[in-house]
Structures are given as structure tokens and as C-alpha cells.
Amino acid sequence: MLSFAIIGLGILLFKNLFNDLLPAGFVIISLIAAGVTFFLLNRHRIKRTGIAKLSMSDLTIELNQSLYINFADLKYYYIYDGKNGPAFTLGFINGSKFKIAANNNFCNVDLIMVFLTDFRSAIENYNAQNNANIIRLESIWARKYAPHILSVFTVLIILGFCFTRMPVLILPISFSASLLVGWIRYFQLKSKNKLVDF
């Protein structure tokens, strides 16, 4: 955000103070370079190093502070491997959530992948030994209210096709593929009886 602020403020200053002194192309290229340089010099400050301690019935995560998670308090977990790295969400019985993601632009994601493999094994063992029912959420579309959300997006995309022209028509075209994948995933999980009601 600060990188974009540098570019935005630089353009405002250029328009108000130096409009006649410097060529616009030079200023824009210089401001983009300044924003990128600022980001690269401060990228290490974005990372947080943490420690996860996993046992048969609980998990302790130490980031800025220590968080103790008893498996008995969990309702579900969701592990997602996105294009920028893995993320996992823990859903608690009391309705609260905890989410951690590792972005491969900033850090080595191999360690968290090893942790997530161990975490999943620990949860499966806990479920088997304690007759617990901690659900592994397989997709964000594995919820019973997913058709309502997908239907709203479907209507919006149809309206987008009806009321837009090129180049804006590219937006509904690009979103329609993701929407189709969402519908397919929902019906796959429904046929396997893997939908959850939360």
C-alpha cells in the first residue's frame, strides 16, 4: 500500500509543482521504480516467523503471541493450496476462526507444507481415537448455502453479458470460468454427500 501511495503522491506533486520542468514519462517511470524499490527493500518486514508445536491432542502456534488450540475445540479445518502458497483455516465450535497463509513471494513454503501434512495426520488420528467429528472441509463450495452464492454470481454474470460491451465484456467472460468450476465442485461434493451445514 505504501508503494502505491508513493506513486500516487508523486503524481500529485508532479502535477502541482513540477509539471513544466520534467517530462511526464520520465516522472511516471521514476515513481514506479521508486515504489517497486521501496517494496523490495521492505519485503523482509512483512514476513513473520512462527513455530508450531503439534501433539496428539493439541497445537500451539507461536507468532506474535502464543496460541494454544485444543483439538476438542475444533469443528472443522480447511487446507487450501493456492497459486501463492498454502493456507489453512481452523473453525472452532464457538464460531470463531483462525487462518494462516504462507505466500511464496515472501517465504519458503516447504516448511508449512510439512507442518500441514503432519497436522492433517494428527487430526485424523485424533478423530479415530476419540470418536471426534472434526470435519475436513474439502472446498469453500462444500457448504449447503453455496448454491445461493453461486446463483447470485450467475445472475450477475448473465446481466454482465446482457448489458456490457467490449472491452468491459471481458470481465463477465473471465469470471464465468471460475463460476463454472464452482458449480461443478459443488455438485461433485453433493453427490459424495460431503456438504456441511455451517
Image: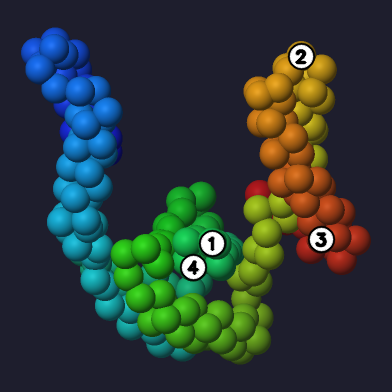
Q: Residues within 10 Å of mark 3 (few under 14, many from 20)?
A: some
Mark nearer the N terminus (2 vs 4) = 4
Residue of label 4: 86
- Picture coordinates of residue 22 (x, y %)? 14, 22
Judged from the image, the secondary structure of the residue bearing numbered disc 2 is: helix
The vertical placement of 134 against 13, above or below, is below
The residue sitting at 51% across, 50% down in the picture is 95
Q: Rounded to the nearest whole Å, what is the CA distance between mark 1 and mark 3? A: 22 Å
Residue of label 2: 163
Of residues 163 and 181, the one drawn nearer to the viewer in this rendering: 163
The vertical placement of 79 against 5, above or below, is below
Mark nearer the N terminus (2 vs 1) = 1
Judged from the image, the secondary structure of the residue bearing numbered disc 3 is: helix
Residue 83's disc is: 1
Q: Rounded to the nearest whole Å, what is the CA distance between mark 2 and mark 3? A: 33 Å
What residue type is disc 3 on?
A: Leu
* Residue furthest right in the image: 191
Q: Rounded to the nearest whole Å, what is the CA distance between mark 4 and mark 3? A: 21 Å
